[in-house]
Image (tube, rainbow, N blue to C red):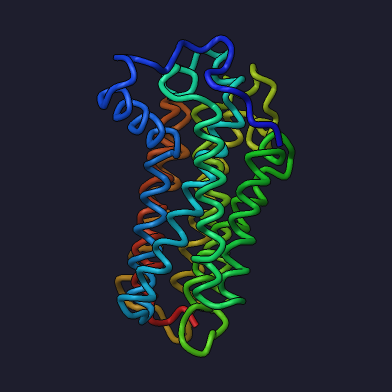
Amino acid sequence: MATPEQPTAGAPSARRGGGGTGSTWFRARALAGSCHPGPTAAVTVLLTVLARAAGHNAVSTALIAAAVLTGQLSVGWCNDAFDARRDIAAGRRDKPIAAGAVGVRTVWTAAWCALALCVPLSLACGPLAGTVHLAGVAAAWAYDLRLKSTAWSWLPYAAGFASLPAFVALSLPGHPWPAWWLVCAGALLGVGAHLGDVLPDIRDDLAAGVRGWPQRLGTSATRLLLPLPLVAATALLVLGPPGPPGARSAAALLAAVLVAVAGSVVGRQWERAAFAAAVVVAALDVALLVGRGAAII
């Protein structure tokens, strides 16, 4: 894969304030902004909390957190570096590369370094667990490099999110298999995350020639579909474990259904309502996922 020289043609220079400490700090901050810091932090924190809830000790939890963090960093930097030319052409000033705050080569280098760190950190959690996690990271890279613009754009998200709870379970002593309902719920959360991530940008993506699954569905269909995989994930997290669901779990499932329906109805008039509802349902799913930590096997 080519690694373009920095700065990319058409972007302003990243050299602000000369070559001193201030300039170095500015570029470091811009590099951090290129890794998609919100999702990177959210996934890392979620998996760290899930690992502790599942019974990992402090050392193994830290190892899992480091593996997940480096994997997420590599995916985020790969995404921004690969999309640099399109972001520059679209005038995306919110993107550090397009704004000229950091060069493409720097971001590519960071992506490959993070990936190189992710491999031994993942395998240190166990050969099978590490392989599962690395397969999820590979799926995310495949999305960045190719599948984002195909009808299969949902698949890397499903595979990547399903691999995360499996990674936590397989890293436990004895390397137990994860519960089926947990892996399926993770996959559904991934599909919902994909729809929610793309929904606000569908029109811009279509103008730029990006035709993934949500772009092919269109804004209205994606808005209506968005809550469904998240509610399905809620149902699995509530009904999948053995025994009848508790009162709190049942209430969470009812709340997810009501919020999803309300988001779809209000979304006809206010487009952001469906996305807001999906965020609420996803938060309920995350709370249920963490609450099920001890039952992930």
Write the residue at 47% across / 87% down: 173
Residue 39: % across, % down: 42, 45
Measuring from the top left, give residue 73's x and y in whole percent.
47, 47
Foreground residue among 107 and 18: 18
Q: Does residue 77 appear in the picture of this structure?
A: yes
Q: Is residue 169 above or below residue 3?
A: below
The one of 119 and 151 positioned closer to us in this rendering: 119
Measured along the vertical axis of the image, is residue 273 above or below residue 98? below
**219 or 16: nearer the viewer:** 16
Task: Say above or below: 102 vs 124.
Answer: above
Residue farthest to the left, as pictured: 22
Identify which residue, 150 or 2, lies in the foreground. 2
Q: Total label count?
A: 0
For image coordinates 56% across by 31% down, the residue present is 81
Q: Is 205 placed left or right of 284 in the picture? A: right
Q: Residue at x 50, y 74 (%)?
A: 125
Answer with the quarter of the image where residue 225 lies.
Answer: top right
